[in-house]
Image: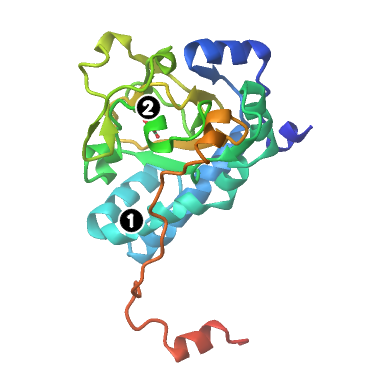
Amino acid sequence: MASSLMKLGTLSKADREFYNTNGYCLKSDFLDREIIDKIRNEAKELFAIQIRNNGIELNSLEDKDFEPALYELFRIDFNSFIGGAKLCQHTFSMHQLAVSEGLMDNLKHIGLEHPVVCVKPLIFFNSPHISKIEGHYKTPAHQDWRSMQGSMNSIVVWIPLIDVDRNLGTLEIVPGSHLRGLFDSVEDDWFRNIPETEIPESEYVSVDVKKGDVLFFSSFLVHRSGNNTSQNIRWSMHFRYNDANESSFIDRKFPHPYKVYHPEKDLVTPNFPTKQDLKEAYSND
Ligand SMILES: O=C(O)CCC(=O)C(=O)O
């Protein structure tokens, strides 16, 4: 019943078996498209505030209007773009989905006895037009466990917010790689990547996905981004979870390797707010 609230499909025993063998499970038409549109629109609306505040024309939130306006914001006021990009990570709609009962039930179906959120849910908007380094729109080969270091059965839920084809750069995975151990990796601009010498090119498989599909994959599955050669933004969401009942996670004392979530010690905007600013903010007029 809970699943229907968020209009999510239900994983079966066969899905779980496929997942354990291959390290991933792709479900088509699994999630209500209205929810997805709501999440993407909420993110667009936040960017739109900064776009308009910079005097950039924006006639509608349709991609044909929105994307050039966002690229312009990136060009003329990078800090406003970054502010929007960060705030998009804090929308109610995305967080509601990430902690919905429907999603939690499915994590249990796939084998997590006591699912807990590993890191904040993420919304990605990948395009070379709004990136300063390649790693911001195209991740190299890696295993998410390197950054998560949580339970052995920790999982990533990867959700496209639009149809993603080869032009937009599909996700590329190495089926079965979750059983091949933790690969050696080298530090880079982005984080750490698995060098080409570790896994031949021929082992990567492109995952074509449509809006409404959901990809569940093990945090040990090797994956990377395809190349977005289009003029458009490739929108997706990434949720990560641990299992608080997994014995190695318990014995390792629930490690959480994300160290930096700490407030700035100095004022971000010097001399702000003044008493007068506060009086106006709290005025009853
Ligand atoms: O969405 C992508 O292309 C890659 C995302 C990814 O690799 C990750 O979040 O770990």
Q: Residue at coordinates 42% horizontally, 26% vertically from top-left?
A: 164
Q: Quadrant of the N terminus?
A: top right
Q: Closer to the camera, 248 or 131?
A: 248
Residue type at mark 2: give it.
Gln
Residue type at mark 1: give it.
Phe
Q: Quadrant of the C terminus?
A: bottom right
Q: Disc 1 marks which residue?
A: 81
Name the mark nearer the viewer: 2 or 1: 2
Q: Is residue 175 visible?
A: no
| Rendered image quadrant of residue 206 | top left
* Ligand 1 lies in quarter: top left
Q: Disc 2 marks which residue?
A: 143
Pinpoint residue 111: horizontal percent, then vertical percent.
Answer: 62, 23
Q: Residue at coordinates 41% horizontally, 47% vertically from top-left?
A: 258
Element type where label 2 sits in the image: loop
Q: Residue at coordinates 58% horizontally, 29% vertically from top-left?
A: 247
Number of residues whose C-alpha sits closer than 10 Å to that of mark 2, classed few (under 14), some (14–19) or many (20 or more):
many
Q: Is residue 82 visible?
A: yes
Q: Is mark 1 within 8 Å of ligand 1?
A: no
Q: Closer to the camera, 141 or 265?
A: 265
Q: Closer to the camera, 119 or 127?
A: 119
Are the residues at dot 2 and dot 1 in contact (C-beta closer than 8 Å)? Answer: no
| Rendered image quadrant of residue 196 | top left
Pinpoint residue 215: horizontal percent, then vertical percent.
Answer: 51, 24
